Image: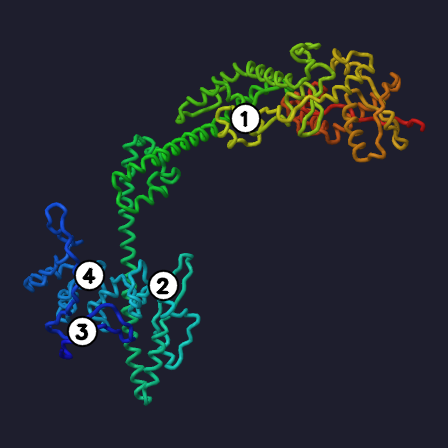
Amino acid sequence: MSEAQRRSTRLAMTSPAGQQFVCEEDEEDEEAPVEQKTRGKKRKTEDRQSKGDGQSHAKKIRGRRGKLEDLVEMPLDVLFEIFARLKPIDLLNLARTSKDLRAMLMSRSSSSIWKEARTHVIPALPECPEDLSEPEYANFLFGKNCHHCARKVSTTHIGWDARTRICSRCMDDHCVPLKNFRPSGYPEILKTFIPGISVIKKSGRYNRFVFFKFDDLWRKQYQSMDTTTAKNKWLEEKVKERKAIKEHAVACEAWFKKVLEDLDLEKTRLIEDRRAIVVKRVKELGWGDELAKMTQYYDPRPQDSDTVTKVCQKDLTEQILLNLEPYLNQHMERVKRDRVYGERKDLLRKRLPILGVVRNNCVSTLPVNGVYPTANELLCNPAIRNIIDNTPLSANFTEDDLAQTVAQLFPDITRQLQQDIELQLLELLPKEYGPDPIVDPKTAFELATTVFACASCNRFLRHPRVLVHSCTMAYKCPPEIEDHKVLNELYTFHDRDRYRNHRGCISFDEKSAKLIGEVVEMCGFDGLTTTAKQMDDANPIFECVGCNDPHQGRVMMTWAGVLNHSHLVRDYAISNETLAKSMELELVSEKEANIVRERMKEEQERRRARCARELICAHCGHDKDDSVKLAQHVKNVHSIPNPTSKDMVPAIDRDHVPPIFYMWPPRST
């Protein structure tokens, strides 16, 4: 066999830098006859006879083998007309199907076909550079394989000025990070032309690598020159060559960027078309009206959800749409629920303050120390709720829409509210007030021994203070009230937004009731029938003998002050076990009691004038000042020149028990 016959028609093309590519090209322009390599004969197997007729089964051939074998037999003008309508990537794939097609397309005489194929690429390609042939240029731009390991990978990194595609695994063998690269052995001007590649990681970090083989090649070439003239000539040619490659690489990179942008636009268009199909299916499911009510910037549209976006990455089949329907229904149900909730919230945000104004107008005509419903409690009334709910949103909702109805219902709502609270308080009372009572439950709140305790502020409460105690007013709407979620979001820390939830912190104080029972009996009254009013009218004064202080005097207190004093004695005993004092009460004489009452009254008036906000304006309920400023308020606001006790009354939710009085001289020890 001659040398020419043994010579392979596959000619590996090498870039000026020595980089080998996958594309091949014939050595000569004319198509020389190529000797076909004789294939080895496969080992024949014994024919397997059919069980039925004794005939052997024909071997099934997968795919469509041999379909292109007659293509090369076509007339050249017809064949070239077909090739001229293809794109470079099509010619590449076609050249890899058979040796005959490869021999034809890789011939230099077929360069016009490749040039024509490049004109079909949009956006337009840069012209083929001088350092690459047409097939090599096509493989560089459109190939899928790594030019170093020939593996077909999903992603390759492109070195535009290195004329190569490289996979991540091969980068370790052919590249080095730019920060670690130290070129040497040739002029400095050439170092700026070292081919490199930029890699952007998923984290967004930007890394630059260079191909160190160029550095080795250029060093060897430069140092192989014997004379300075030769080195200068080599340098001049190399700089000129690399400048041209650099300019072409920039053009290719710009083209590739435009290709990616066009692909993104096309992908976006396809996804939008598929989203339109999803929207059509949502309308077919009966959600057209709900879609029309959605706003693009507020409501989560179904076609914009992550689930639908993921589905729209591929073609939508009927089965995919059927599988998507449950999610679409759930999504639209959630959207509708949120829309109704938002509309309800907006309606109450606008109209609840108006109801609060109407409520305050009603309260302003009633005594200041009453038990009155808040605006949110008025909203629970069906008639009032009906007005707020059914008045069109487009209507100008004002106080006049509610004033008449609220004024008519306010007394009944107030009465029912107080009854409900008292029924709940009756459930807290001990059994002797229960189903087989010794005392009438209707008068149980009036008894001197009916004492409640607040777990929040540790105060002793009596009726009617317990009905309006601030600790029983909660800003959190009870779950049994309709719209409780909306109302909890709308609270603004005003009385109109509060609810009575006293059962969470109010309890009947049995120890205090027992102590008061003993105090009542010390006065000669019956502990089961004596009322708090009877004790206030008698106004007995007690002395705690155990708390006698040689430095301050004898400890005097009213019957109601016994509870406060017992609380102090208990705390003192807990913190000072060795000095614990027992509470020994004695009823003082009427002569001493009269003196103590006058002194207690003076001290109480002094405390009110100094800082305590125990009094409120009987005309408007103003309670932010001491008694001196409050009197000035009555004069200025209500034009009353000489305010009296009728104009400034004790606030219902304040402690009006006179303070302890130390009477001098102390008891002798």
Question: Which quadrant is home to the N terminus?
Answer: bottom left
Rendered residue at 29%/33% (across/down): 283
Precedes in sequence: disc 3 or disc 1: 3
The residue labelled by disc 3 is 8
In three-dimensional space, the C-alpha distance between marks 4 and 1, rounded to whole angstroms, equals 73 Å
Q: Amino acid at mark 3?
A: Ser
Q: Quadrant of residue 100?
A: bottom left
Residue at 39% of width from left, 38% of height from top?
298
Q: Could you say which disc has been placed on residue 93 in the image?
A: 4
Q: Nearer the viewer, residue 405 or 103?
A: 103
Badge 1 amino acid: Pro
Tell me the SS state at disc 3.
loop
Task: Say which of 495 and 207 sits in front.
Answer: 207
Residue at 51%, 31% (x, y): give it.
Answer: 490
- Specify few, some or many for label 4: CA neighbours under 10 Å numbering under 14, 14-19, or 20 or more: few
The x, y position of residue 197, in whole percent, is 35, 67
Q: State which quadrant residue 647 falls in.
A: top right
What's the CA distance linking mark 3 and mark 2? Answer: 32 Å
**Rendering coords of residue 439 (x, y %):** 70, 10
The reply to whether the C-beta atoms of the residues labelled 4 and 1 are less than 8 Å apart is no
Locate residue 454 relative to residue 574 in the image: left or right: left
Q: Earlier in the sequence, mark 1 or mark 2?
A: 2
Q: Which residue is mark 1?
A: 478
Instruction: In the rendered view, tell whether residue 629 sits above or below residue 107.
Output: above
Q: Nearer the viewer, mark 1 or mark 2?
A: 2
Q: Residues within 10 Å of mark 2 (few under 14, many from 20)?
A: few
Front disc: 4 or 3: 3
